[in-house]
Image (cartoon, grey):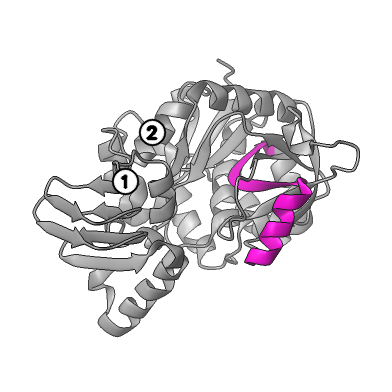
């Protein structure tokens, strides 16, 4: 196993589109959403521990989740748990991890991944990531994992490649230069993307050597670079927490996609050789779960569904739930909170949760 290979797992989101199962106190990455006996965070750790030495795997999350992380991943070194004092999106999160790793190993080759993905083929996943790491180890490049789209999805970002010289550009098993990024298009645009066969879904998994990432930060996010590069002699010392708490209050909030990937000229994509889903919504869970004879996905030992088709129904074992006459709905209960909404409207759940927070406070979110 290459000791220069590192992994950064981002585990700081609150998963509001998975409400009410996912809430601020215990977001979806800390839940066994797929019913495997391992939480999403634990499954992500399991995958990357077959690619990188465990001592080279870092977890980035909010300060409030320190105990949950240590409880679920007792093998992770304390110095490898990076705690953000406030949410600042993915660019500062990634900068923190990468600048800290660079202080330890300037030859580090890093894969960055969210903690809440469904991966359907572990062998294909490892093969794709290792191929990407081999590429970035010797190239000044920023690499992302692309997913061949199967539908005109409006909830994902899209990556366009230059397909002018290939009839089926998404079928090629090679690393390809990225032409454009598009964030969550409207439906008609997503349909066009699907028809052109020049677009991948953006998985949110990135690979680069640490020097390439730092050069990109200097060029496209100099304010972030100035803040985090100032800690080169502070990372991995007792003064690190105080330093991070100070600079985060000064740091802009921006995603790595908007801040770096859409700007940099040296961005590449490698096609995924594995089934993938961003487990960001109830609908994505439905797609990747076993259905009954009526096309329902049911989680809970006290759920009874009659004359009901194409639904996802989730209930805690403390509650009896009876559903009759629904088609293509999400019905979810947790901690006394109930959500009933058509599957086609699931993108509105985040806005609904925000309304709940505005009107009722934080107790329900």
Q: Can the viewer see residue 261 in this picture?
A: no
Element marked by disc 2: helix
Give above or below for 312 relative to 17.
above
| Depth order, front residue of 232/144 | 144
Residue at 27% of width from left, 73% of height from top?
362
Q: Determine the image quadrant of residue 24.
A: bottom left
Residue to which mark 2 is pinned:
43
The residue pinned by badge 1 equals 30
Q: Position of residue 116 (x, y in %)?
A: 43, 45
Q: Is residue 283 above or below residue 172?
A: below
Residue span colored magenta: 186-210
Horizontal side, residue 46 vs residue 97: left or right: left
296 horizontally vs 5: left or right: left
Judge the density around disc 1: few (<14), some (14-19), many (≥20) Cα neighbours within 10 Å.
many
Q: Residue at x 57, y 20 (%)?
A: 3
Q: Label 1's element?
A: helix
The image position of residue 114, as x and y in percent, is: 49, 45
| Closest to the observer, 341 or 159 | 341
Q: Residue furthest top?
A: 1
Residue 329 lies in the magenta-colored region: no
Residue at the (86%, 36%) spot, across then down: 166
Location of residue 258 in the rendering, given as x and y in whole percent from the top left corner: 68, 60
């Amino acid at each position: 196993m290459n000791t220069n290979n590192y992994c950064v797992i981002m585990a700081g989101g609150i998963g509001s589109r998975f409400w009410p199962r996912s809430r601020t106190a215990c977001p979806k990455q800390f839940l066994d959403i797929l019913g495997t006996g391992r939480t999403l965070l634990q499954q992500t750790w399991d995958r990357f521990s077959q690619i990188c030495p465990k001592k080279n795997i870092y977890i980035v999350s909010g300060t409030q989740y320190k105990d949950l992380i240590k409880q679920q991943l007792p093998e992770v070194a304390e110095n490898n748990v990076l705690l953000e004092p406030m949410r600042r999106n993915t660019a500062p999160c990634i900068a923190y991890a990468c600048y800290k790793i660079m202080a330890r190993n300037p030859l580090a080759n890093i894969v960055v991944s969210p903690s809440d993905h469904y991966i359907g083929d572990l062998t294909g996943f490892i093969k794709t990531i290792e191929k990407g790491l081999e590429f970035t180890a010797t190239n000044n490049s920023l690499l992302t994992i692309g997913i061949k789209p199967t539908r005109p999805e409006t909830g994902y970002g899209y990556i366009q490649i230059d397909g002018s010289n290939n009839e089926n550009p998404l079928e090629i098993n090679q690393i390809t230069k990225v032409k454009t990024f598009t964030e969550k298009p409207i439906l008609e645009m997503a349909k066009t993307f699907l028809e052109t066969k020049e677009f991948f879904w953006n998985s949110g998994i990135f690979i680069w050597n640490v020097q390439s990432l730092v050069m990109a930060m200097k060029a496209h996010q100099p304010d972030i670079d100035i803040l985090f590069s100032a800690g080169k002699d502070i990372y991995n010392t007792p003064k690190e927490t105080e330093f991070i708490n100070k600079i985060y209050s000064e740091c802009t909030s921006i995603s790595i996609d908007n801040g770096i990937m859409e700007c940099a000229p040296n961005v590449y994509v490698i096609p995924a050789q594995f089934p993938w889903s961003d487990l960001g919504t109830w609908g994505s869970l439905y797609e990747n779960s076993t259905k009954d004879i009526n096309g329902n996905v049911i989680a809970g030992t006290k759920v009874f569904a009659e004359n009901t088709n194409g639904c996802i129904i989730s209930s805690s074992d403390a509650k009896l739930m009876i559903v009759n006459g629904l088609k293509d709905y999400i019905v979810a209960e947790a901690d006394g909170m109930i959500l009933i909404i058509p599957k086609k409207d699931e993108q509105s759940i985040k806005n609904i949760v925000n309304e709940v927070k505005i009107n009722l406070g934080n107790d329900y979110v």
